[in-house]
Image: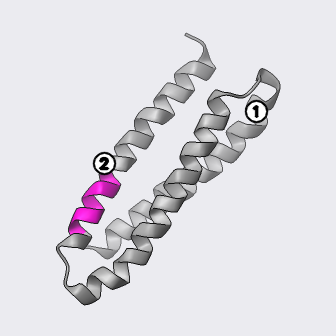
Amino acid sequence: MSKRKAYIQKMEAQLHELDARMDELEAKYDKRSADAKIQYQDTIRKLQGKRDATQKRLTDLRNSTDEAWKELKGGFEASWKELRNSVERAASKLK
């Protein structure tokens, strides 16, 4: 297996783990009062937007040529880091 393919599979698995974490956060938000739900809906919407953007970058990375791989990989990693940090910040607000 090439390093590129292994990297993509690893990141897909990590994205699935983050999806599960986001589902947990959403479930916790759903248990909050109506006022709190309104406040957190925006957070959930933003997380989902970042998640969708990260998934698109991963798809672009998977479908890229060898020449574009390096450039796209940097963009994906920045998107991934922002998504992961955003999920962690949202999780810390629920504690």
Which quadrant of the view contains residue 67? top right
**Viewer-nearest residue: 19 or 94:** 19
Q: Residue at 60% x, 44% y: name it.
A: 56
- Rendering coords of residue 53 (x, y %): 58, 52
Label 2 SS = helix
- Rendering coords of residue 84 (x, y %): 47, 55
Side of 95 relative to 51 (left or right)? left
Which quadrant of the view contains residue 23? bottom left
The alpha-carbon separation of the residues under discs 2 and 1 comes to 28 Å
Q: Is residue 61 above or below residue 31?
A: above
**Viewer-nearest residue: 91 or 19:** 19
Q: Is residue 73 above or below residue 51?
A: above
The residue that label 2 is drawn on is 20
Q: Is residue 46 above or below residue 1?
A: below
Label 1 SS = helix
Q: In the image, what residue type sits under mark 2?
A: Ala
The residue that label 1 is drawn on is 70
Mark 2 near mark 1, Cβ–Cβ under 8 Å?
no
Question: In which quadrant is the C terminus drawn?
Answer: bottom left
Q: Is residue 3 above or below residue 61?
A: above
Question: In which quadrant is the N terminus drawn?
Answer: top right
- Rendering coords of residue 28 (x, y %): 22, 68
Q: Residue at 37% x, 75% y: name it.
A: 41
How many numbered discs sit on the rendered protein?
Answer: 2
The furthest residue to the bottom: 35
* Model colouring: one colour
What secondary structure do most residues of the magenta stretch adopt? helix
**Viewer-nearest residue: 42 or 89:** 42
Is residue 27 part of the magenta span, yes or no? yes
Structural crowding at the residue carrying mark 2, measured as other residues with C-alpha within 10 Å and reported as few (<14), some (14–19) or many (≥20): few
Side of 50 relative to 94 (left or right)? right
